[in-house]
Image: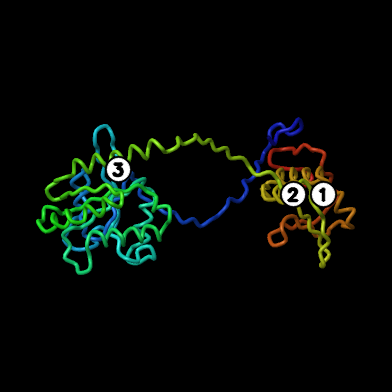
Amino acid sequence: ALASPRRKAPGFALKGEPGQEREVTLELKTVADIGLVGFPNAGKSSLIAAMSAARPKIADYPFTTLIPNLGVAEAGDVQFVIADVPGLIPGASEGRGLGHDFLRHVERCSALLHVLDCATAEPGRDPISDLDTIEAELTTYKQSLADRPRIIALNKIDVPEARELADLVKAELTARGLAVYEVSAATTEGLRDLKFAMAELVARARATRPEPEPVRVVIRPAALSEPGFEVVRMPDGAYLVHGEKPARWVRQTDFANDEAVGYLADRLARLGVEEALAKAGAEPGDTVLIGDLDDAVVFDWDPTLPAGGGHAAGPRGTDWRLGG
């Protein structure tokens, strides 16, 4: 690009322009088809372990799970990914506990499975109140989560009292239009029907999801915002050449290479910078700044050196006008 009839083998190259520097916050979200949501210790980790090859940490105390666990399940010809979202508590949508860290993973799930603990001995809790609390947190965090398809798993029916409670609340949940499954992660009872119901939800979501359009990204250098330049007389008598083109050309110049400096002088002359400086009243030896005022490059103007004619540079890397 720098070669010409007179400069057949240029002895210099243009420097690259400074890059852009930014601070970026990268937020990672689990990608899954179905998210398991519920109170701590509701049995979500046991459920995903029973339905997939995932092996999350399981213990009999709350907040055993501190990060989402993923498991791949299969029912019929549908394979889907389950996310065990760590236990939610009242106020999670406002950041209580690890609320925001947990809830952000639910955003990527196309469907939800409420895991309700039917064997909890905690005062003031039952499957209905647990469901209402979690639904309120989901809706408060992001309204769009209220529209996600969801089904209910009444868990821990291997406990006799829990089975009785599940039978009692199932009618009310069904009356709300929810599909309800009584299951035991410990004995795997009811998991086959639940798994097929989850697969049906996933298949329905995939069928309604629009096909992603192929994206071809073409990156081109931004066009110069202004084609010309202006010469400004400074209070101290110096002259400022302000314009995107001359500023960029200066940034690209290797000032340790005389041939590159001569090439810059020719470009500036062809653009009309020397003529504009003369019209502005510049005299030989005056100070000329090119670029933005805070980081401009300073020159001593010497109009006696011919520029703009594409002069042969002589030996590579030199220019006779600069004594090289």
Residue in front for this viewpoint, 264 or 218: 218
Q: Quadrant of the C terminus?
A: top right
Among the 4 quarters of the image, the one containing residue 219: top right
Please tell me whether mark 2 sits on a helix, a strand or a loop: helix
Rate crowding at label 1 as few (under 14), some (14 to 19) or many (20 or more) other CA atoms within 10 Å: some
Q: Which residue is mark 3?
A: 81
Q: Quick check: 206 left or right of 233?
A: left
Q: Nearer the viewer, mark 2 or mark 3?
A: 3
Please tell me whether mark 3 sits on a helix, a strand or a loop: strand
Hey, what amino acid is under mark 1? Val
Q: Which residue is mark 2?
A: 246
What label sits on residue 273 in the rendered view? Answer: 1
Rate crowding at label 3 as few (under 14), some (14 to 19) or many (20 or more) other CA atoms within 10 Å: some
Among the 4 quarters of the image, the one containing residue 208: top left
Please tell me whether mark 1 sits on a helix, a strand or a loop: helix
Residue 97 % position (x, y): 32, 66
Note whether 133 is above or below 254 in the view shown. below
